[in-house]
Amino acid sequence: MQEQLKEFVWDTISSSENKLTGKDDALKAMVTALKEEINELKGELKIFKAAIGNGMLATKSKPQAMDVPKPKAFKGVRSASEVDNFLWAIE
């Protein structure tokens, strides 16, 4: 009886050990795959950062606001010369 109990315990331990070894291998494979993916993403991030950095350097600065003279307000006079002068000032 004692021998059977001993054998049962060893079989149980062996079975549990085999299951844990299988799970350990699966976890190691997942960690390796995740590390590879992280390295790929880091590489892509470097590329994107470089592209953004180059884009920022390549963009032109905003043109400064120009000081454009404003024409005098049209007074509504029905004179061809006044209309012509107003339009000339606009151009």
Image: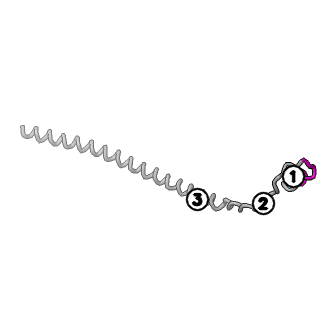
Mark linked to residue 68: 2
Q: Nearer the viewer, residue 77 or 25?
A: 77
Q: Position of residue 68 (x, y in %)?
A: 78, 60
Query: What is the chief secondary structure element of the magenta stretch?
Result: helix
Residue situated in front as seen by the camera: 49 or 81:
81
Residue range corresponding to the magenta coloring: 78-87
Amino acid type at image mark 2? Val
Question: How many residues crowd mark 3 within 10 Å: few (<14), some (14–19), many (20+)?
Answer: few
Nearest to the observer: residue 21 or residue 69: 69
- Residue 2 picture location, percent across and down: 7, 40
> Counting other residues with Cα less than 10 Å from the Cα at mark 1, is it few (<14), some (14-19), or many (20 or more)?
few
Q: Are marks 1 and 3 in contact (CB under 8 Å)?
A: no
Task: Classify mark 2: residues with Cα within 10 Å, few (<14), some (14-19) or many (20+).
Answer: few
Which residue sits at x=91%, y=52%?
84
Q: Position of residue 62 (x, y in %)?
A: 68, 60
Q: Amino acid at mark 1?
A: Leu
Q: Position of residue 38 (x, y in %)?
A: 46, 52
Question: Which-is-in-front pick, marks 1 and 2?
Answer: 1
Cα distance between the residues tagged 1 and 3: 51 Å
Residue 50 shows which numbered tag? 3
Q: Quadrant of residue 17?
A: top left
Mark found first going from the N terminus, 1 or 3: 3
Name the residue tied to disc 1: 87
Q: For the residue labelled by badge 1, is the local secondary structure a helix, a strand or a loop?
A: helix
Q: CA distance from mark 1 to mark 2?
A: 15 Å
Q: Name the amino acid type tagged 3.
A: Ala
